[in-house]
Amino acid sequence: MTAEPPTVPIRPVAGQPAEPAPVPAETPALSSPEPPTVPIEAVTGDSAAVTLPPATRPCPACGQPVFADENYCQACRAPMTEEAAAEPAAGAVVGGTPVDAAAWRQSGAVCGTCGSGPIDADGYCEACGTKAPSGRDHEETDLLVLAGVSDRGLRHFRNEDAMALGATQAAGGPVAVAVVCDGVSSSGRPDEASLAAARAALGVLLAAAEDGQDLAEASTRAAHEAQQAVKVLAGPPGSTPPSEAPSATFVSAVVTATGVTVCWLGDSRAYWLDESAPAQLTTDDSVAAALVTAGIMSEEEALASPNAHVVTGWLGADDSGTAPHVCTFQPPGPGVVMVCSDGLWNYQPDAAGLAERALPAARTSPLAAARELVEFANDSGGHDNITVVLVPFPPAGPLPAGPHDVTRELTP
Amino acid sequence: MSDLGFTVEVFQNEFLPAGGSDVNAIVTVTSPDSGQPQQPTGAGAAEIIIIDCSGSMGAPQSKIVEARAATSAAIDAIRDGVAFAIIAGTERARPVFPADGRLAQAGGASRAEAKRAVADLRPGGGTAIGQWLRLAGQMFGSFPSELRHAILLTDGKDEHETPADLDAAIRASEGMFSCDCRGVGTDWVVSELRKVSTALLGTVDIVPDPSGLAADFAAMMAKAMGKQLADVSLRVWTPQRASVRFVKQVAPTVEDLTSRRGPAGPQAGDYPTGAWGGAESRDYHVCVQVTPGTVGQEMLAARVSLVVGADVLGQGLVRAVWTDDEALSTRINSQVAHYTGQAELAQAIQDGLEARKRGDEDAATARLGRAVALAAQSGNEDTAKLLAKVVDVVDAASGTVRLKRTVDDADEMALDTRSTKTVRTRK
Ligand SMILES: [Zn+2]
Ligand SMILES: [Zn+2]
C-alpha cells in the first residue's frame, strides 16, 4: 500500500492521467478495434489502484476512458453526452445515457471506423456506412450501493441484455435491487423484451422493499409482472406467431442488511462471491443443466454440447411452462452478490473463479469491478452480450438522493 | 398529391455470413392516395398521340378505321385544360392537329376540331418511327409542361430509316417525354417498340385485332391523366468502397434500370422512374456489393429515396449485419426470392423466343420449359396461359414442354411483349 495517489489506471490509457492532453487517434492502444487487455493482477493487488483516474470518465458508447477535456471518445469516436434527465421511479436507474444520432450530430464527432464520415440522422456513417455505437451497445450504471455494466460484446450486432438497478432506504437499512434479463435471440424483438421485463420487475421489488413486504413473495410477483410486460410486446393473442413471441430470461436479487432474495427463470445467474465460500445461487433452466442434473454429463461436457444454451424456462407470451424459482440466502459475512447474463459466466462458470476475478475490488468499487468482468468476457471472445451487476454485502450508504447516474459525474 | 409523403418499405434479409458482400433488397414504393377527384393540372400536363398512317394501315382498311376511332376515344379522355396534339406518322412526321405544330388546350371545341382532323387521316407512305419521336419532342419543347406523355401506334417495321437513326431519336427523346407504344396486327417488330418504350419509361403491348384499339387507347389515356408527379427518380446512396450491382424495377413489370444511372452527388446515383399517379405502387430490386464488415458489425448498405429535383419524397434503409449465426445468414427473404424468379422468368421467355426464331429448338425448349416451371411456381397465371399457346406443357412443375409446331404470330408477340409482367406475392 502506498500513501501516494494511484497512478495505475485500470486499463492502459495512453498519455499521462496527470496531463490529460488529447491522445492522437493513431495511438495503438486506443485506435485498436479490440478492447485493450489488462493484466488481472493490476486490479487484484491494490484496491486503490482500481479507482478511475480522476481526469477520465467512461465513454457512454464503448466504456473506454475518455479524458475530461475531450468531447468525444478516442476509441469509438462516440460523442460524450450531457447527462440526460430520465425520470425513473425514485432511487431506480435503468441503464445509462444513450448516445443517439442526435448526440453524434451535435458533437460533430466523426465515425470511429473510417475516421472521416459524420454520423447521419439514422445513426450511420455518411462515408463508410458503419453503424455508430449507440443506445445500449455499452451501458454503465453506478448507484454506489451497487453498480452494473451491460455490453454488446464483440460478435452480436446489438445488446439484447438489459439491466435495471435500484436502491432504497427501508426500515432495516438500505436495500439494493438488481434485475438482469437476457433477450432470447431466436425470438422477435428480444432487446425490447429484456428491457421491458427488467424495468417492470424493478418497480415491484423496490416498492416491496420500501413497504417491508415479504421479499420472496414480491420476487415471484416481480417475475410475473415482468412476464406481463413481455407479453404486452407480443400484442393481442394471435397477432404474433409463437416462434416470434418476444422472450427473455430473468434473474433478480434483492439485497438487504440481513439477506439476499434471488428469483430466476432461464440461464441468467446470481452468485455469492467471497474469499471463503463463493457459491452459485441459481440453477439454470437449460438443456445443459438438465443433462448435468440427470447425471448424463459433467458440467464441462454439457456446456460444450451443441444445445447447451437452449433455455427451458423464460418470460414470454409463449409461456415456457416453467415457474420462476425463488431462493433466500443468508451470507456468512461480508461479500458481494453478483447478477449476470451467460455472456459472462460462459467464460468462467464457477463461483470461485469469478470471486477471484471480482474481489476485492467489487467490495469497494463495484462499477470498476463490473467493467473488469465485462472486459474479461470480451477478451475471452465476447461471443454474447455481457451484463454484470455487483452488489457489495451488506449494502452500505450513502444512497443516491434520487434518480441518479453517477457514471457521468466521475470528475472530481 | 398535396402530401408528397411516399412510403418506402424495404424487404430483405440483412444478415450476411462472415465475408459476405452482396446485399439484396426489394424496395416497395407507394405514392400517396390523393383522396380526391383528379384536379385539372392545366399547363402541367401535355399529351401527344402519334398515329401510324403508312400505306399498310389501309390493309385491311379496318386498321386505319379503328385507329381513327381509337384516337378519338383517347381525345375524349383528355382532361380539360391539358395541352395536346395529334401527329400522323409515315416516313416523315406531320402535325395533324393543331396543324401549326404547336399544342392546343383541351376543351369542347378543340376536341371536336381534333376529331374532325383525325377522321380525315388516310393511309399512304412509309415508316420512320425516329422522325415521329423527333417531331413529338419538338412540339413538347414548344410548350412548358411538367407531365409530358405520348401514345405511339404502329402496324409495321421501322423500315424507312436506319436502326442508328431510330436509336439517335430515342436518345434525344429520353427525359423529354414518356411514351406508351402499341403495335396493331402482327407485322411490327416487338424489339423495336420495346426499345422505345423502355427508354421512354412507358409500356409496350400488342393489339392483335384493330377492334380492340379504342378501349385500349381510352384506358391508356385515363391512366396518363392520373399521373400527378413527373420526373421522379429513385436515388441510391451507397457507402464508400461499395458498388451497385443492379437496380431493377420488378413490379408491375421487370425493367432493368442499372445502366440508366445519372449522377446525384457523392456516393449516389439517380435512376429515372418517370411519372407517378396517386396510390401507385412499384417494387424495385436493389443489389449492392459492399466491403465485408466484421461479425457483429452493422452497416448501411444503401439508402434508397424517391426524389423530384431537390425534394426527397420518401426513403428506406437497406442494411447489412454480419453474423456467425447460420440460421440467420442462410435465410432467403421471400420477396427477394420471388422477384429473382420473376426476373428470370422474363429472361427465359425472351431467350426462348429468340432461340425459336433462330431455329435452335433445343435451347428454345429448355428456356421456355424453365419459364413454364417458374410461372407455375410463382403463380403467374397470365404468363402461364400465354406460354401454353406457344408450347405444349407436359409437366409444369418440372418445366417439361414441347414446342408447338404451329404458333399464331399474335400469340408469340403477346408472350414476348408481356413477358416482363410480374405478379406480386404476400408481404
Ligand atoms: Zn467509445
Ligand atoms: Zn465511417
Image (tube, rainbow, N blue to C red):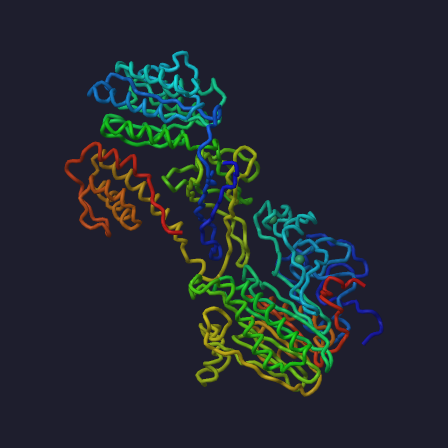
Q: In this view, does A365 lie above or below B369?
A: below
Q: Which of A212 and B347 is in front in this view?
A: A212
Q: Where is residue A45 in the image (x, y as percent from the top left)?
A: 73, 76
Q: Position of residue B28 (x, y in %)?
A: 44, 45
Is A112 on the left-hand or right-hand side of A296?
Answer: right
Q: Is residue B21 above or below residue B225?
A: below
Q: Where is residue A57 in the image (x, y as percent from the top left)?
A: 73, 61
Q: Residue at x 47, y 57 (%)?
A: B17
Q: Is residue A352 visible?
A: no
Quarter location, residue A370: bottom right
Is B271 on the left-hand or right-hand side of B153?
Answer: right
Q: In this view, does A356 lie above or below B409?
A: below
Q: Residue at x 53, y 78 (%)?
A: A324
Is A206 on the left-hand or right-hand side of A383?
Answer: right
The picture quadrant for ligand 1 comes to: bottom right
Q: Where is residue B364 in the image (x, y as percent from the top left)?
A: 23, 40
Residue farthest along the top direction in this orientation: B100
Residue farthest along the left direction in this orientation: B405
Q: Which residue is drawn at 34% across and 14% down?
A: B92
Residue farthest along the bottom direction in this orientation: A332
Report the number of numbered marks: 0
Q: Residue at x 64, y 73 (%)?
A: A178
Q: Can residue B164 be seen in this view?
A: yes
Q: Is residue B115 above or below residue A249?
A: above
